[in-house]
Image: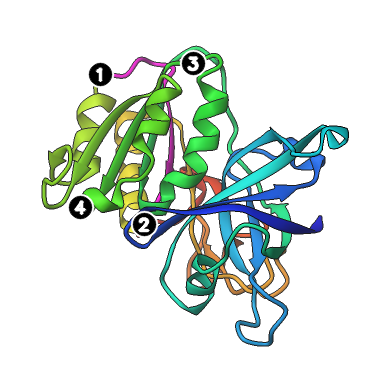
Amino acid sequence: MQFKSMVLSNVEVSPSYFRLRMTAPPTISGSQPGQFVMVRVNPAIDPLLRRPFGVFDLGTFETAYTDCGRQSFLEILYKVVGKGTALLSDLHQGDHLDILGPLGKGFTFGEPAGEKLLVGGGVGLAPLYYLAKELVKGSKVNLFAGGRNKDDVLCITEFERLGVETYVATDDGTLGTRGLVTEVFEQQLAKAGPNAMIFACGPFPMLQAVALLAEKYQVPCQVSLEAYMACGVGACLGCVVKGKNHSDSTPDYRCVCKDGPVFDSKDLLWS
């Protein structure tokens, strides 16, 4: 689905990190947590390509015009890392965007019984927030958030408002436990019940560590991968990763955009 969207707000929630809310068609409510949208900032040639962003939140709001009823909105959480995201950070209420999505495969919730363990870092927390909103309706949810410092740990208060128990770790100790979030995560994973499930999104080394812990403790694990992509629909093959059966003689590649971005951790080659 391609649609025009109007910016409702664009707020810097931490240095270089922004939370953008925009209008969306009512059909956006059918999106799965973990899916993403491709955003075109403007119709100019540069930047030519759309940028992929995980869906942070969906909802409705009351418009100023009583005869319009409630309007759907879509939120993304992003970090300014290049020209496209810099242009995005300059947008204000009333500016317009061109959106393609929702795209890709989202998270599978599993059975309500058992703890749901969410692990994220930086903007990897974005798809986990929308996921947490759905999971807390029937399950106990714990979040493990990591970053280099306190500025990289985003929107923790919003998770806590959902009733999510949060654990934070930063490399420099400016927020939460000093060290890697996977170290804090393993301490709790060892105590988790037999029906626990893991959901993770963030930098590849963090996902790799989470996948290995999931294997060690025999806990089902889904990971949402972040990747550069040009088309978002599997045509350009710019976002392929190695599948579990990959070798030099038997190539096994998966498109993050079309086959993911959410994968069972056992379906990927991590080494």
Nearest the viewer among 59 and 129 is 59
Query: Which is in the foreground here, disc 1 or disc 3?
Result: 3
Sequence-wise first label, 4 or 1:
4
Sequence-wise first label, 2 or 3:
3
Residue that carries the numbered disc 1 in the rendered image: 191
Sequence-wise first label, 3 or 4:
3
Cα–Cα gap, marks 4 and 1: 27 Å
Amino acid at pointer 3: Ser
Q: Give the range drawn in magenta.
A: 191-204
- Horizontal side of 169 relative to 12 (left or right) equals left
Residue count near mark 2 (Cα–Cα under 10 Å), binned few <14, some 14–19, many ≥20: some
Cα–Cα gap, marks 4 and 2: 15 Å
Amino acid at pointer 4: Asn
Cα–Cα gap, marks 2 and 3: 26 Å
Contact between marks 4 and 1 (CB within 8 A): the answer is no
Contact between marks 3 and 4 (CB within 8 A): the answer is no
Residue that carries the numbered disc 4 in the rendered image: 149
Q: Position of residue 201 (x, y in %)?
A: 43, 47
Q: Is residue 247 above or below residue 5?
A: below
Sequence-wise first label, 2 or 1:
1
Residue that carries the numbered disc 2 in the rendered image: 203
Q: Quadrant of residue 215?
A: top left
Q: In which quarter of the image is residue 133?
A: top right
- Horizontal side of 19 relative to 6 (left or right) equals left
Q: Position of residue 163 (x, y in %)?
A: 41, 19
Can residue 15 be found in the magenta stretch? no
Q: Position of residue 22 (x, y in %)?
A: 65, 51
Nearest the viewer among 70 and 158 is 70
Residue that carries the numbered disc 3 in the rendered image: 139
Cα–Cα gap, marks 1 and 3: 17 Å
SS at mark 3 in the image: loop
Query: Which is in the foreground here, disc 4 or disc 2?
Result: 4
